[in-house]
Image (spheres, grey):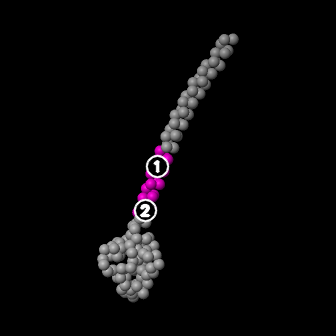
Amino acid sequence: MQTRFRPHLQEDLYFSDWQKRQEERLGQLTEQQERHHEQIKETNKKVEEQQALINELVKTSMSHSVFRHLAGITILNKYEYLEDEEIGELFKREFYYLKHRGFIGPSTLEFDKRLHKKTSRGWRNQPILD
């Protein structure tokens, strides 16, 4: 009778060892998953920070010609708005860009042919960032 039970005991031992190895592996995988989860959270945080920087950069970025207008309004005592057949509406688009992003004001100021050859003395500069 003892020989009959011996194969079952051996199978039980093999199964017990296999089960322990699987539990150890499961524990290792769980730890690895937790580490990966933390890494993903850190990466997401960095991506959000970079996106905020990009958004801020986009708010304050401008073309060379628009920057020249802003510098002229800011630095020069007299800066004329031009809108005629030769120039077209180029100045208008560039000045509205500055106005809509808060670089110049007042907010009620409209740019059209009535301002042709008018100076920028009444256009107060706005803070670039809040």
The quarter of the rendered structure image containing the C terminus is bottom left
The answer to whether 57 is drawn above or below residue 107 in the figure is above
Label 2 sits on a secondary structure element that is: helix
Q: Main secondary structure of the magenta part?
A: helix
Towards the viewer: 32 or 109: 109
Within-10-Å neighbours for mark 1: few <14, some 14–19, many 20+ = few
Q: Amino acid at mark 2?
A: Glu
Spatial CA distance of label 2 from label 1 is 20 Å
Residue that carries the numbered disc 1 in the rendered image? 43
Disc 1 secondary structure class:
helix
Q: Are marks 2 and 1 in contact (CB under 8 Å)?
A: no
Foreground residue among 47 and 100: 100
Q: Position of residue 57 (x, y in %)?
A: 41, 63
Describe residue 75's horizontal placement relative to residue 8 as left or right: left
Percent position (x, y) of residue 29? 53, 36
Q: Which residue: 35% across, 82% down?
A: 119
Q: Quadrant of residue 59?
A: bottom left
**Amino acid type, callout 1:** Thr
Q: Nearer the viewer, residue 67 or 110?
A: 110
The stretch in magenta equals 39-58
**1 left or right, relative to 59:** right
- Residue 56 is marked as 2
Q: Is residue 86 left or right of residue 35?
A: left
- Location of residue 28 in the rendering, given as x and y in whole percent from the top left corner: 52, 34
- Residue at (50%, 38%) from the top-left corner? 32
Image spot of residue 55 (x, y percent) = 44, 62
Q: 28 or 13: nearer the eye?
A: 28
